[in-house]
Image (cartoon, helix red, strand yellow):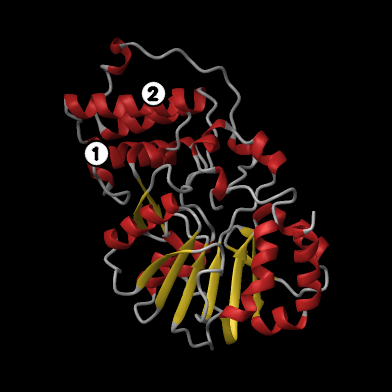
Amino acid sequence: MRGGPRRPPPAHRLYFATPRRPDAAVTHELASIIDFIRYGASRFSAAGLTFGHSHDNPIDEATHLVLASLHLPPDIPPAYGAGRLTSEERERVLALIERRVSERLPVAYLVGETWFAGLKFKSDRRALVPRSPIAELIESGFTPWLDHRHVERALDLCTGSGCIGIAMAEYNPDWQVDIVDISDDALSLARENIVFQHVEGRVEAIKSDLFSGLKGRRYDLIVSNPPYVTEDEYAALPGEYSHEPKLGLTSGEDGLDICIRMLDEAADYLTDDGLLIVEVGESERALVEVLPEVPFVWIEFKVGAMGVFALERRDLIEHADAIRAEARARRDR
């Protein structure tokens, strides 16, 4: 998932030698929330950490770590920044900062939570840290894509932590949403997030290898943030990404194996006026090269293109032969 992206831009990496752990005399001078955020940001920058899991800079990363560890919301009024930490809180925050530096663990895993589409989700190693630009589509009501389209049932395919499907249900109380993954670990976390967000009556978590467990179901909208990292890219990823499940990241030589399967099967699970929205990140160029005749519409976000396409069911049907031929060639490799 992106937005922080799965493959962080080089500018998000800082190359300095990791400093030695500061002694108690240094950290004893820290007192307020702002002190610890500033200190954490400085430690992260000096240590050459990679930022790409929800945040793209050390200040936001440190803010997330400090506020979450103090059980405070991210939109805390600025005046609270002067609040002083207790000795127990100091020890906890400093320990988490050092783990972020020494173990390269994403902050979301360290504090057990992150934010997506304005909602808080549980986060741990069972699934990728939520960070897809699809959050922007959810918050905007998928405009203009759904402006004149009636949606009753939606599907979040390759759901991971459940963030996309659960957020769709939160923003659209009249939708029934299925969230699907092949991973038992991911689904266990997704089910916890369903309960955490109180959407048990409108969101169903289903174990399925793409559409194999969804026979007879049809959807007005299918949204997916599937694995799309190549094996070569995965081998070159910074240490932060090694803590995430590889199953949620890689998808063949060009990162498109799962996406092509999805394109091959999706029409049977969409209603007549159904829409498919899929994130493929930096595999966008490869997808256009292997299926040049398919009219993918690449969605623009506030920060520009992010490798997310929209495709109508009728286009899937019209180009079914080319898609099927590509899917068959991949199966036969």
Q: Is residue 248 above or below residue 143?
A: above
Residue 75: percent from left, percent from top: 31, 51
Looking at numbered disc 1 in the image, what kind of residue is underneath it? Leu
| Residue 78, disc | none
Residue 284: percent from left, percent from top: 72, 59
Which quarter of the rendered picture does the C terminus lie within? Answer: bottom right
Left or right of residue 290, residue 247 in this image: left
Mark 2 Cα shell of 10 Å, populated few (<14), some (14-19), many (≥20): some
Looking at numbered disc 2 in the image, what kind of residue is underneath it? Glu
Secondary structure beneath disc 2?
helix
Residue 272: percent from left, percent from top: 60, 89
Residue at 55%, 31% in the rendered image: 239
Left or right of residue 99, residue 299 in this image: right
The earlier-in-sequence mark between 1 and 2 is 1
Please give the count of numbered marks on the rendered protein: 2
Instruction: Determine the CA span between mark 1 and mark 2.
Output: 16 Å
Mark 1 Cα shell of 10 Å, populated few (<14), some (14-19), many (≥20): some
Whether residue 63 appears in this view of the structure is no
**Residue that numbered label 1 is attached to:** 70
Residue at 39%, 29% in the rendered image: 40
Left or right of residue 284, residue 162 in this image: left
**Residue that numbered label 2 is attached to:** 98
Residue at 77%, 78% in the rendered image: 319
Q: Is residue 159 above or below residue 52?
A: below
Secondary structure beneath disc 1?
loop
Residue 151: percent from left, percent from top: 47, 84
Residue at 39%, 40% in the rendered image: 109
Left or right of residue 301, residue 139 in this image: left
